[in-house]
Amino acid sequence: MDGNGRWAERRGLPRSAGHRAGVEALRRVVEASPGLGIGTLSVYAFSADNWKRPEAEVGALMMLFKTYLRAEIVRLKRSGVRLTVFGRRDRLPEAVRQAITRAEWETRNGGRLHLRIAVDYAGRDAIRMAAMQWASDAANSSLPPSREELGRYVAAATHSPDTSPVDLLIRTGGEQRLSDFMLWESAYAELFFLEEFWPDISAHILATTVEAFRVRDRRFGGLSLRTGS
């Protein structure tokens, strides 16, 4: 969800206003996703490297995240949305951890959409911690882990109950890089890089991108089902 700060700066607003506008964009995307056939929506809210940002901005982001979790519970439950958070939790403020726990519990029965929010997350750290944990568990084994087995370790390393691969990865804000997001799970993801900043994302833009994804020829290393090439 990139471009909140730049969206605000171009309007002469503080960066915090961009982050608040980003929350509104997230609401639009969450509301539109089930109707587009999306069952799981994973969003990158705060990376492990975002701790490098100014302390005031980090504090504002944490406050906004806590406020979002507390304010959205009723809306999410009413819409059948299950919310989970993945990434590290030990460095988050206690109030944020409590808000996460409550939101996950209150929305646990949502079956229409699984909204996954990455907070203090880094894909390389997830893979590193997974490898370390597997090595510890399998100290007396001579067999390497299967992809599926290591994938479960990657999920466990980030408090994630979901081990499914990413199908469609969208990055907003004109940047064309993954920035350490779900590297293991995105091995065969279809990538779309949009010029629009995240606060400008609408249900229409999301629908257009999903439609473009559906006509992609996904071969997963094999032959095309369309042309045999």
Image (spheres, rainbow, N blue to C red):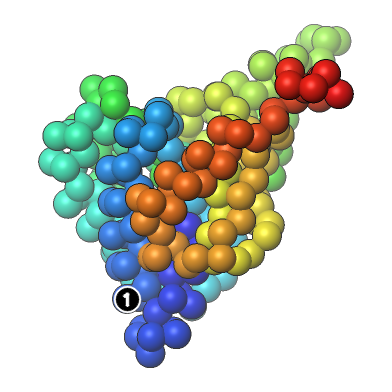
The disc labelled 1 sits on which kind of residue? Ala
Q: Residue at 25% x, 49% y: name it.
A: 69
Q: Residue at 49% x, 26% y: name it.
A: 162
Q: Is residue 137 above or below residue 216?
A: above
Question: Callout 1: 10 Å neighbours few (<14), some, many (20+)?
Answer: some
Q: Residue at 28% x, 60% y: name it.
A: 24
Residue 170 in view: yes
Residue 181 in view: no
Q: Is residue 216 above or below residue 61?
A: above
Q: Is residue 138 above or below residue 207?
A: above
Closer-to-camera residue (169/83):
169
Residue, far front: 227
Closer-to-camera residue (83/155):
83
Residue, far bottom: 12
Query: Along the horizontal axis of the image, is 106 left or right of 125?
Result: left
Q: Position of residue 52 (x, y in %)?
A: 56, 70
Q: Which residue is mark 1?
A: 17
Q: Residue at 57% x, 38% y: name it.
A: 213
Q: Quadrant of residue 64?
A: bottom left
Which quadrant is home to the C terminus?
top right
Q: Position of residue 80 (x, y in %)?
A: 22, 29
- The mark tally for this picture is 1
Q: Is residue 175 above or below residue 17?
A: above
Q: Position of residue 202 (x, y in %)?
A: 36, 56
Q: Position of residue 1 (x, y in %)?
A: 47, 57
Closer-to-camera residue (130/15):
15
Q: Secondary structure at mark 1?
A: helix
